[in-house]
Amino acid sequence: MSSLYDVAVVGGGIAGLSAGLAGARLGRKTLVLTGEILGGQLLSIARVDGYPGFPEGVAGYDLCPMAQEQAVACGAELAAERVRSLRRADDGWHLFGEDGGEFVARAVVLATGARLRELGVPGEAALRGKGVSHCASCDGPLLRGRVVAVVGGGDSAAQEALTLAEFAARVILVHRGPGLSAQASYREAVRAHPRIETRAGCEVSEILGQDAVTGLRLADAAGGVSDVDVFGVFAYTGLQPMVDLVKDMLQVGPSGGVPTDGWMRTDVAGLFAAGAVRQGWAGRAVASAGEGATAAIAADRYLRDLD
């Protein structure tokens, strides 16, 4: 069993790493349990815009390693172990890893993030990895010169459409609303790009293909159905907060996230939440970083009160 930590952070995305950095800077013995892969959802983002200090944007797969280096330099410990369960005890919180590790901390920051929601349509599961993808920067080069589809109307969908447009002959952006809900800068960039075509008021009813994606079946608001030939489908229709560790100890919010107050405190003493796992998360990398730091500061105040 590991020694007792002041703060254990569960999650290796920008919220978790920011919490680890802030906790270490406050002089707390801080452990960040990152899981096997560092970076969370940012790994698939080719460029994070609007993050302070990076006026030209920064690749998501670069941002988290930089945050990791800074956290470690300030004294945070990192362990590449995925937490399978979490239990409150008299001496604090016990965290049990999938690889058999057990860690004890006086306070916990939950920064487990969220997973991309699936479309839940025929063909999606069977063709995953055969044209169905969630990573434009990973799979875009494999579809160079071909027609692909992005499903969704928010920031992530717009960003991925712009990334794919660097490789694809044409990107069809399918969204069910009358217009994109992405922030204005992304909407304008999508509108101006000659290789991006938007299909508003449509939903995907089926992904077509046998051994690989060959098309999409779309249904419009008027009840019409049409097939579109595409060779890749990238779905960005929302996030599902990853709350499995705490779903038995507190009530999740309407969107499935963990409710907190402004200091990232949950209803359970000593348990804090930050980033995409939290109910009310603003949906930005910079918001995740701020919430992670806020959670660590709140954990420090909680521990001072205990002492």
Image (spheres, grey):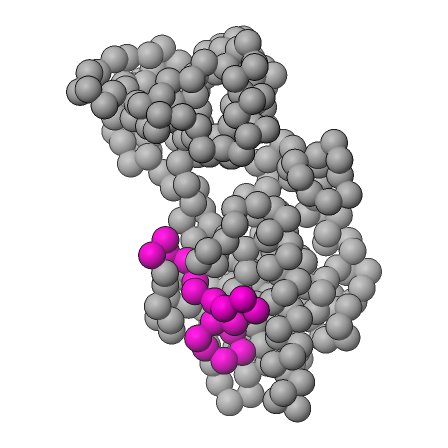
Task: Tell me where residue 51 sits by quadrant.
Answer: top right
Where residue 256 appears, as percent x and y from the top left, is 37, 56
Q: Is residue 92 above or below residue 204?
A: below
Task: Indicate whether residue 263 is drawn in magenta.
Answer: yes
The quadrant holding residue 237 is top left
> How many labels sit on residues?
0
Lateral position of residue 27 relative to residue 281, left or right:
right
Query: Residue sitting at 59 percent across and 42 percent down?
Result: 42
Residue 53 vs 273, above or below: the answer is: above
Q: Is residue 47 above or below residue 95?
A: above
Estimate the x, y position of residue 155 in percent, counting from the top left: 51, 34
- Write the residue at 29% across / 36% down: 120
| Stretch of the chain drawn in magenta | 254-271
**In what quadrant of the picture does the C terminus appear?**
bottom right
Residue 280 vs residue 163, the one in the foreground: 280
Q: Main secondary structure of the magenta part?
A: loop
Q: Nearer the viewer, residue 110 or 180?
A: 180
Queried whether the magenta region covers residue 23, the answer comes back as no
Tell me if residue 143 can be seen. no
Residue 154 x %, y %: 46, 34
Q: Would residue 27 be seen by someone viewing this image from the given angle?
A: yes
Left or right placement of residue 54 versus residue 116 in this view = right
Q: Residue at x 25, y 26 (%)?
A: 205
